[in-house]
Amino acid sequence: MAESDWPAAFSTLQPFLGWALATEAERTHKRQTSEMADIQAFYVAMLSHLEDVLVYLNQFPLERLPSHAQQLMDMTLSLAEIAPAVELFGQPREDDTFDPFRFVPQHH
Amino acid sequence: MKDRQPTGTGENAAPDQSNDRWNDKYPHLGTAPIPIEPYISREYFALERERIFRNVWLNVGRIEDIPHPGDYVVAALTVCRTSVVVVRGKGGQIHAFHNMCSHRGNKVVWDNAGRCRNFTCKFHGWSYGLDGRLTFIPDEQRFCGLQKDKLGLTPVAVDTWAGFIFIHLDPNPVETLRTYLAEVVPGLEGYPFSELSATRFCWRTEIKANWKVAQDAFQEGYHFPVRHKASAAAAFTSETNPYCHFLSLDLYERHRRTSSYGNLDYTPTPVAGMAYQFGSSVVVERGLAMDNLPAGVNPTRRPDWSIDVFWIFPNFSIFPSNGTYLTHHFWPVSADRTIWETRTYFPKAENAGQKFSQEYSKVLLRDILMEDGTTLEHMQDVLASGAKTHMPLQHQEICVRHAYNVVEDYVGFYAGR
């Protein structure tokens, strides 16, 4: 990614590029193996810009996102992945729940 | 993008109490506890294999799974001790065969899905066309008296309805697919399956539970306030309907349908709200665009509706909602093993906002299903203990009762006992 491509408005999201993951399996793995404090930090940063990020991304054709936009897209998908952990469970996975790694995505 | 958020001020009437006592509507099903034996018995399982799964139409996916000639999927029908290849032929028609070479029985396809020009056995190289005809035998002259035209792949019956592909192991079934589905066709006719099937997600897992233990867990809302307390109870229950009573249901000879309640006063979480703003979400979209649904889905037209379920005997279910639908398959492996497959479908995402919205809906669904998954194995662990012989069921669990009755009608395990 060219440094200059990243929108200045979203500069505070750059430290969270580790959440720019392309597949559900990768995002699930990241959620299930992260500390809750790190998940929470990503949630707060991402949610505060989410509406602007989606409006920004909506200007591109979905199938031909520039690479920096694809990273932002994948980060919004990671936000969707961790949202239940933050908003509903207060932990990466609930107590007494089915092993998430056994429910295997057949999609990407 | 939509410009309004759900306000949480919708009318929130209790379901019609006169409809609450479903056993009264279907007195022939009785009210007695149902036996545990069918959930644990190997003998019962063997009868299910012979009398149900070899004798009914089984869903193996959708036409969008195999859009082009040569596209195939493989259904691992362990319950019927076979594997079935479903393939789109050169002319666009769909064929289905036992996945078994006519020579010495090797599977002709080893993966779950793909695209090919013909099927070539990886043992000795026998080759078959997409229509199942045997087209090539290496060193053919060394065989004696081979009738090549009679050695094609063994066909099974295949037909489609509303884009769903069904197979029947009898190549000439007595009952057509249309007749088999006649009870549920009026309810689903006109639902935009094709439009909503552009985006498909699918998860698969093998669980240590009988297929009916697994399937029954999705046939009632009674467990919602407890099992889904953290995830979904707030959206699917309320003070006026704390136990997720059905809005309506119909039990047929083999199949059944239900309508589930949705809480109009539910306040979405921040991310759910954004998912709604940029797309749609089952948990927050209430009473909107009802006109887009066919009359058979949410037939009572109540605004506090969330999702319907159509249970297609024996192991397939379709959950149509507003703008999305999902399906479950519960494939028996043995008396205490099941392959559970869930698919969720959306229209083509036209932009990033819609893609995000679909991702949230999909993740939330998956996390709710994870809550269901655990109980299934815990139940199976002790069902065979002999400590209990029967399960009491209440009015709102009548679908479990109906399912038991329909299975037993086919199996006849208790007939004459």
Image (cartoon, coloured by chain):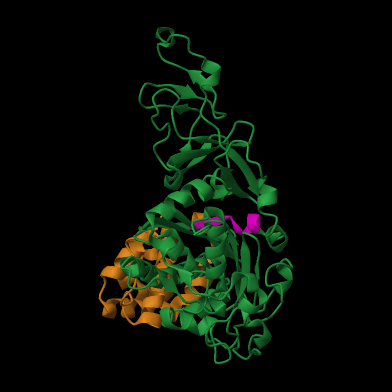
Chain colours: A orange, B green
Q: Is residue B194 magenta?
A: yes
Is residue B250 found left or right of A78 in the rendered image? right
Is residue B163 found left or right of A48 in the rendered image? right
- Residue range in magenta is B193-201
Q: Quadrant of the N terminus of chain B?
A: bottom right
- Figure quadrant of residue B121: top left
The correct choice, above or below, for B12 with respect to B81 in the image is below
Is residue B384 found left or right of B308 in the rendered image? left
Residue in the image at 60% along x and 88% along y? B7
Q: Which residue extends farthest front? A: B416
Q: Is residue B280 visible?
A: yes
How many numbered markers are drawn?
A: 0
Is residue B300 found left or right of B276 in the rendered image? right
Residue in the image at 65% along x and 87% along y? B17
Residue B73 in percent (x, y) is at 49, 42
The correct choice, above or below, for B167 with respect to A90 in the image is above
Residue B93 in percent (x, y) is at 63, 36
Q: Is residue B63 visible?
A: no
Residue B320 in percent (x, y) is at 61, 65
Residue in the image at 67% along x and 45% along y? B176
Residue B67 in percent (x, y) is at 58, 43
- Figure quadrant of residue B324: bottom right
User: Residue A58 or B346: which is nearer the viewer?
Assistant: B346
User: Residue B76 or B129: which is nearer the viewer?
Assistant: B76
